[in-house]
Image (spheres, coloured by chain):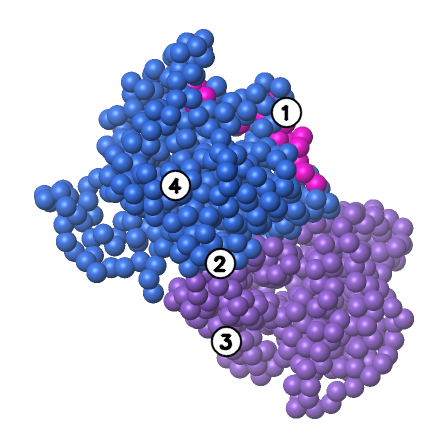
Amino acid sequence: MSEGVASLGADAELSMLREMAASFAAGELLRGREEADRFPFSPLPLATLEKAHGLGLFSLTLPEELGGGGRGTEALALLLEAIAEIDASLGGVIFVNALAQEICLRSGAREALKGLVEAESAAQALIAFPAWDDPRFTAPTVCAVERDGGWSLEGKAEYVALSGLARRALIPAVTSKGGISFYLVGLRGEGVAVSDPVVSLGLRACPCHDLQLSGAEAAPVGEEARGKEAYEEAYIRMLPAAAALSAGILRGSLREALDYVRQRRQGGRLIADWSEVRMILAGMAAADQEAEMLVRGACRAVEEGGPGWRLAVRAASLRAMDLACEATTDGIQLLGGNGYMVEYHQEKRFRDSRQVQALMGTQDMKRQEYARLLLAEESPEWGRDVC
Amino acid sequence: MRKSGRGSLIGEYPAFDDIYCGLRALRRMPKAVIGETEKAVELARRFNREVVRPRALELDLRKQKDPDYLPWDLVREANRWGFYTMFIPRIFGGKGVNFPALSCVLEELASGCTGIANLVGVHYLGVATLCASWNIRLMNRVMRDTVAGYRSGEPCLISLAVTEPDAGTDVEEVELVRKARVSCHARRVKGGYVVNGRKIFISNGHLSTWHMLIAYEDLKRPQSTTVMLAVRNGTPGFSFGRQEHKMGQKACPASELIFEDCFVPDENVCVSAEQSAGLLGGAVEDAIMQVIDYVVSGSRAGVGAFGTGVARGAFEEALHYAASTEVEGKPLINHEWAQCLLAEMYKNVAVSRLTYMETNYANSLYGMFKVLNYRPVFYLFKYLPRPVIDRVIRPLLDLDAVTRLFRKIYFDWQPPPFTRRTSGWASLSKFAATDAGVRNCQLALELMGRAGLRHDGGVEKHLRDSKLLQIYEGTNQLNRLNLFKCLIAPSVPGAVVFDE
């Protein structure tokens, strides 16, 4: 592995990380983002993924003893925010992979993550995962069966992100014990059929496929039927990272809008001089600041803990995701017809913000869960449905 | 707030006539309008079931793969079903279904696919523009071309070409066009105009045969030198440029039209600056604004119907999802919060529909449809035998006197409050319904998560399609200003619009 983020040392170097990410995004993503976003009707930017792997962007949060960067949520959030400002798709790839790694770590399955940093290719380093589902609320559609001392998977796993790229996927499944268990399955092995890419609203260069599993050999990750707990621990640590993607998209939209309104004239004056345009701009800029503060606050809550930290992380992350959706809608509006055209990238941000908002389950289920936890703070019986 | 001028409490702000258009219109509405509308909606639903829904996603994907693809097969299908002649008055050879029913048809189609709904709706934007000039001879010629296209199976659509590279929102308002950077120049020459310039974002451009072109005799005085010309494909100097690459509404191409020394003969001039000067006692700018108001009062109701349709499409997808998905051990549809959410979405659809219906009532009473929806005229045109129309009415349409009569009715005898009312309501419907459309798509996504993100789920396409509705036919910001100008400012002494 080349010198990259893993070689960074103290927390003071977080700003260096951000600069490195911004420079990587400007150098590697800016030019090709429009073409990459046409996937599956254009090829994926595989060379960029290899460079990201070389820089250690896929192992930033892996523990140092596994060769990773050993960084926490804040570093991951900074990285994702900087990348998403230019093109959120690579941010999506990093996020999905980090989420899968985090579940493995929280399940105590460190063995499964060995050798990722030294992997020869991005495909070998990445782990696919159905990152748009929350298995705590939507029962998995895959069953795990123990056979001859091993496990095999049966069923259909829908919308598994990175399954067209990675060699392995982390799949939630139910066993005869009930509950949720996680399994790693080789995507090129017998009994695994990977569908054509699913065309999605956003993050198109972070592709998803459906998997048909028919007796596919799989390795258990963590204890059987203890997946919910592991997922919850990974979920709460990854929420700020998802929110950071939203914040980055929002900032990109704001910057594009600012550039545009300073140049475009309508009715004989710059549109920046229209007071209604300024109202919209002010709303976007305030949302940008708010989202950044929310993400920082959520990251601190994850890393410092303290009373009510889980609630704080949920509230901040949900809000940041909503803000990005609202602001990117305005981001198109400020560019008028041009904002709706692919050349200006505002429409991509509009789509990407929604795609990110739905990471790790629907926004409405996130709200429901948040309310139950809030009520459970005072009266534990209200939170009985939440693990 | 001062009184609106009627001198009684009923005329005080908000004036009774401004806020109860439907109540007044119902009394005058021909009963047959209901049956006609019902039949039109039924046909649209059948078209949705047999053509739109089975093809919408496939067409959207095809266009993503090949951005230059043109959906001729769908246009031919819509032509075969009679959608391009359905609302053309019978005196011009069409089927003569009442124009307000178009909005209901557009809602139906947009609930399946807003892009395909545009393939029909934008044609009538062209028709409405042609009609707003009240050049009866030219209306007759162009619309009969469309009718001939229906009979031959070769569609003959009409587009409207207004937007230019440096002038979008501001060409929909005389006060703004005064300062706009317009570049489409129409030079007066003997026997016509020579046009040079480019138009962009022209919906259905590549698919249309006739183009209602807005150009300017003097680029430094566009507000008083606007001309409207009808340009047919094949005219020397006219060509198509690229198609824009849009986020959604992919079925409907957004085209570039190029005019290079394109000669347009006098017979194809819908309304010239010179003719405008003869209207409204010589107030050229007012006459041009009147034309714009007639067009947008109709077209913005149509966009309101698109917004209603896409809001309904998203609602229907969300409803289906909620009914077929289990969350936490019970059907999502039986979660109280989901029921409230679906009720909210239903409300967004219903309220949006009310706004375009109210706009249509206003148009029927005070706007473009007022003559055709006047009961004796309505029944005369509805039941007059086709041979009588062809032998008696049709020759009259070529007489200058008929054009003069219609222009008298629609310009000189049109009281300003009538125009304010129709234009204000049209703007209200446009931004209320299209905001609701985007909102419902967002709500559906938040409910459905990944099921909504997948192209094969349909909702993500609705969301992509919906966003354009907040932009074209004047951005929603411009429409808010227009509502203020039409329905609020007249009651506030000293209120000035578009003069910041």
Mark 2 or 4, nearer chain start: 2
Q: Are marks 4 and 3 on the same chain?
A: no
Amino acid at circle 1: Glu
Q: Give the SS element for disc 1.
A: loop
Q: Residue furthest front?
A: B190
Which mark is in front, 2 or 4? 4
The subunit letter for the residue under badge 3 reads: A
Distance from the alpha carbon under mark 1 to that under mark 2 = 37 Å
Amino acid at circle 2: Arg
Amino acid at circle 4: Glu
Distance from the alpha carbon under mark 2 to that under mark 4 = 22 Å
Residue placed under numbered mark 1 in the picture: B154
Residue A149: image location, x then y, percent: 88, 58
Which mark is in front, 4 or 1? 4
Taking the image as shown, residue A100 lies to the left or right of residue B152, namely right
Residue placed under numbered mark 4 in the picture: B274
Residue placed under numbered mark 3 in the picture: A289
Residue placed under numbered mark 2 in the picture: B181
Residue B82 falls inside the magenta stretch: yes
